[in-house]
Image: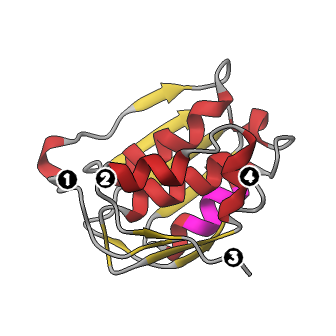
Amino acid sequence: MDIKDNIIEVRQSNLTAFHFDATDCPDLFPPLVVLAAFCDGESTIRGVHRLTHKESNRSVALQQEFRKMSVEIFLDKDVMKIKGAQKLSGAIVDSHHDHRIAMACAIAGLNALGSTTVNGAEAVNKSYPQFWKHLHELGADVSLNHN
């Protein structure tokens, strides 16, 4: 999946870093990381221990893939700290065969400088098979490469 052009203009000054306890809702980590990536300052999300046994180790997957997009994520025991980036970089990222990682990287890529490629993009089929189609209908330049 390639996202070739920016379709969303996010102004850093409108988004402020936040603190959230996601212990009871670990599936919110990926979209919260996307939000935190565009916030001014450092956001924290509690409940990291709940991410280890998902489709991937989401804490590590988010840290690895968002680093490629110029977002620093630090893991400190049960807390994830996300340093908001001035501007994300388009990158080749991997879904880790995890639907939520694939979608989070794609959404972050919408406002990144350059193209974002999500390897393993078909992982979205687990929870949202129409994700790429709907993203395209919203105006994203999406192309699917079937290997």
- As drawn, the label of residue 10 is 1
In percent of width and height, residue 144 lies at 57, 71
**Disc 4 element:** loop
Mark 3 → mark 1, Cα distance in angstroms: 31 Å
Give the mark nearer the N terminus: 1 vs 2. 1
Res 113 seen here:
yes
- As drawn, the label of residue 38 is 2
Residue at the extreme top: 24
Of 110 and 10, nearer the camera is: 110
- As drawn, the label of residue 146 is 3
In percent of width and height, residue 25 lies at 64, 22
Q: Give the amino acid type for the residue marked by disc 3 in the picture.
A: His
Tell us which disc is closer to us: 1 or 2. 1
Q: Is the magenta stretch mostly helix, strand or loop?
A: helix
Tell me what residue is drawn at x 75 percent, y 62 percent.
Answer: 96
- In this picture, which residue range is highlighted in magenta? 60-65
Tell us which disc is closer to us: 2 or 4. 4
Tell us which disc is closer to us: 3 or 1. 3
- The answer to if 47 sits in the magenta stretch is no
Which residue carries the number 4 mark?
98
